[in-house]
């Protein structure tokens, strides 16, 4: 049964997206958040316990340099990821807008994806005005009781706001992305069914990402609060990830299905890419250990205290192409920001 789902998913991917695997850069300008999610290394819950060792962010001039460097390398699509930097959505809007303006100025022709918490309708319109093309607001988990357990404080605790966000994003004229965090709920199939049903209620998604929860490594001598998810409630194996992605492909045949290299990059680029049509390329986590004026080499793995432990393939894409299976071609373009998604 599973193998036939995977084969169907491959066929749908080829029919709707051809052989292109669109790589995007992932940039965390701010490694700071004021929300209390129980599965994230940026959670304020960890800070209270002295376990949270990453505060700060990227210097604006470093950000400008990075965007231009990635543009020179050929990257056309950038995902800017923000934690919840305020309990006030207007203030959050202002802060995110500043980074989007910088990205747009540094790379005018890029396709800009903003990954941030929920905003008011005015906030989304403002993001559109300054040049955002898409907004991703990840739901992470659907079941209301599990959602409440995992989101203890901050903007993200308001599940109703997140359930309405896709319509507000689309009303503002931007493409919409969403995702569940696989591993956060023990029964992934039950979560999947709720996610698909909800997506139909809110008009579907242009992007569906496929993040996987990771174990968080706490600094020596620190502890986590009770109920904090240091280890995922469900361990997502490579085979399970492939099955989840195949089910998502069948449920969202026209959406960009976005893998990431939190799992084995050889498997993600080499196998899952037959089903997914987007994946992260270069990742800058904002952590202090990243060099300020240098793109890191292939294999740089960053910050396993924060859930940002992506494998970093480096800026050059030749190595990724070698990892891809026959019939999958790395492509850094996205049709330009004035063209429709896809
Ligand atoms: S998941 Fe997002 S909102 Fe929650 S603590 Fe982490 S960065 Fe903040």
Image (spheres, rainbow, N blue to C red):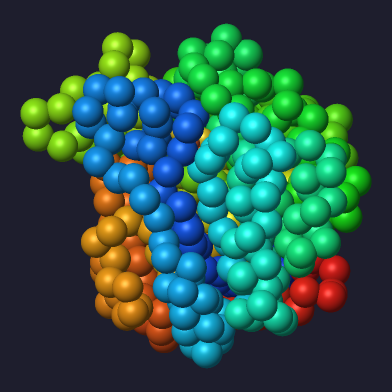
Instruction: Return the residue nearer the eye: 18 or 38.
Output: 38
Q: Is residue 51 visible?
A: yes
Q: Is residue 14 visible?
A: no
Residue drawn at 42 percent across, 73 percent down? 62
Q: Quadrant of residue 112?
A: bottom right
Using the image, determine if residue 97 lies above or below residue 239: below
Instruction: Return the residue nearer the eye: 90 or 68.
Output: 90
Using the image, determine if residue 136 lies above or below residue 33: below
Residue drawn at 34 percent across, 20 percent down? 228
Place of residue 13 in the rendered image (x, y in percent of width and height, measured from the top left): 68, 62
Using the image, determine if residue 243 lies above or below residue 221: below
Place of residue 167 in the rendered image (x, y in percent of width and height, measured from the top left): 85, 38
Residue 178 falls left or right of residue 62: right
Q: Quadrant of residue 295?
A: bottom left
Residue drawn at 84 percent across, 44 percent down? 122
Residue 16 falls left or right of residue 48: right
Q: Quadrant of residue 24?
A: bottom right
Place of residue 149 in the rendered image (x, y in percent of width and height, measured from the top left): 49, 13
């Amino acid at each position: 049964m599973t193998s036939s789902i995977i084969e169907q998913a491959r066929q749908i991917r080829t029919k709707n997206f051809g052989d292109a695997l669109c790589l995007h850069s992932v940039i965390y300008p701010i490694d700071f958040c004021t929300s209390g999610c129980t599965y994230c290394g940026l959670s304020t819950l960890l800070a209270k316990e002295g376990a949270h060792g990453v505060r700060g962010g990227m210097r604006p001039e470093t950000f400008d340099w990075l965007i231009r460097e990635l543009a020179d390398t050929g990257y056309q699509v950038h995902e800017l990821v923000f934690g919840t930097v305020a309990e006030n959505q207007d203030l959050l809007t202002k802060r995110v807008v500043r980074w989007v303006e910088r990205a747009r100025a540094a790379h005018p022709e890029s396709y800009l994806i903003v990954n941030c918490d929920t905003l008011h309708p005015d906030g989304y319109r403002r993001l559109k005005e300054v040049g955002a093309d898409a907004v991703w607001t990840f739901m992470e988990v659907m079941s209301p009781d599990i959602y409440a357990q995992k989101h203890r404080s901050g903007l993200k605790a308001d599940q109703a706001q997140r359930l309405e966000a896709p319509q507000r994003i689309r009303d503002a004229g931007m493409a919409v992305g969403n995702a569940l965090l696989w591993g956060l709920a023990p029964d992934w199939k039950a979560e999947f069914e709720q996610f698909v049903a909800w997506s139909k209620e809110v008009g579907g998604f242009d992007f569906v990402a496929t993040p996987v929860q990771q174990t968080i490594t706490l600094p020596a001598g620190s502890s986590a609060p009770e109920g904090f998810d240091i280890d995922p409630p469900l361990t997502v194996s490579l085979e399970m990830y492939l099955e989840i992605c195949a089910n998502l492909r069948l449920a969202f045949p026209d959406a960009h299905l976005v893998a990431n290299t939190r799992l084995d990059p050889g498997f993600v680029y080499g196998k899952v890419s037959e089903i997914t049509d987007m994946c992260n390329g270069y990742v800058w986590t904002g952590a202090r250990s990243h060099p300020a004026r240098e793109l890191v080499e292939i294999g740089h793995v960053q910050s396993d205290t924060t859930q940002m432990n992506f494998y970093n393939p480096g800026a050059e894409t030749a190595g990724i192409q070698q990892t891809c299976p026959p019939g999958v071609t790395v492509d850094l373009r996205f049709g330009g920001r004035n063209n429709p998604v896809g």
